[in-house]
Image: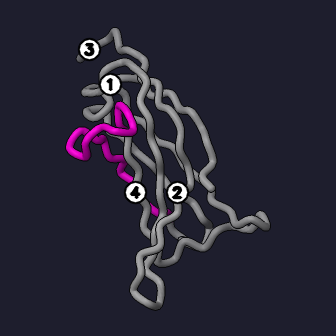
Amino acid sequence: MAQKEDITVDQGSDFSMQLSLVNTDGSKKNLTGYSVAGQIRRTYNTSDSDAINFTAVVNTPQTDGIVTLDLSNTQTDAMEPERYVYDVEISYVDSDANTIIERVLEGRVDVTPSVTRG
């Protein structure tokens, strides 16, 4: 079950956050062989073409369970100051060639307006 966390993004600024993923027993999640993806949308029903993708990577060493999510200042500058929704999923391919997907984080994104423009 995904954790919930609301985040704030400053329009026109670079944004980065790290997630430390752990197993139910509290140990670091081994993310070897996993990929990560995250998206922001205006609503849950927004089309795929309107989604904003995080640059999402599993950090090295993958056994530390750390994922980094980034948005460039160009991406955040294009976002209107308002509330959005987001989620982050990790996935891997099991031994039967099935893709197993787990949502690890979800919530709202509040974009704060920028006054200073380059």
Callout 1–callout 3 Cβ contact below 8 Å: yes
Asked if residue 66 is positioned above or below residue 40 in the image, the reply reads below
Residue extending furthest toward the bottom: 95
Q: Is residue 3 magenta?
A: no
Residue type (three-letter) at the residue carrying disc 1: Gly
Numbered label attached to residue 70: none
Between the C-alphas of marks 4 and 1, the distance is 22 Å
Between the C-alphas of marks 4 and 3, the distance is 30 Å
- Residue pointed to by mark 4: 37
Please identify the quarter of the rendering in which residue 117 is found. Answer: top left
Judge from the rendering whether residue 26 lies leftward or rightward of residue 61; answer left or right: right
Q: Residue at x 74, y 68 (%)?
A: 27
Judge from the rendering whether residue 79 lies leftward or rightward of residue 62; answer left or right: left
**Spot occupied by residue 82 in the image (x, y as percentages of width and height):** 39, 19
- Residue pointed to by mark 3: 117
Q: Earlier in the sequence, mark 4 or mark 2?
A: 4
Q: Residue at x 47, y 46 (%)?
A: 87
Between the C-alphas of marks 1 and 2, the distance is 28 Å
Q: Label 3: how many residues lie within 10 Å, few (<14), some (14-19) or many (20+)? A: few
Callout 4–callout 3 Cβ contact below 8 Å: no
- Residue pointed to by mark 1: 12
- Residue pointed to by mark 2: 103
Asked if residue 37 is positioned above or below residue 15 in the image, the reply reads below
Which region of the structure is painted magenta? 41-59
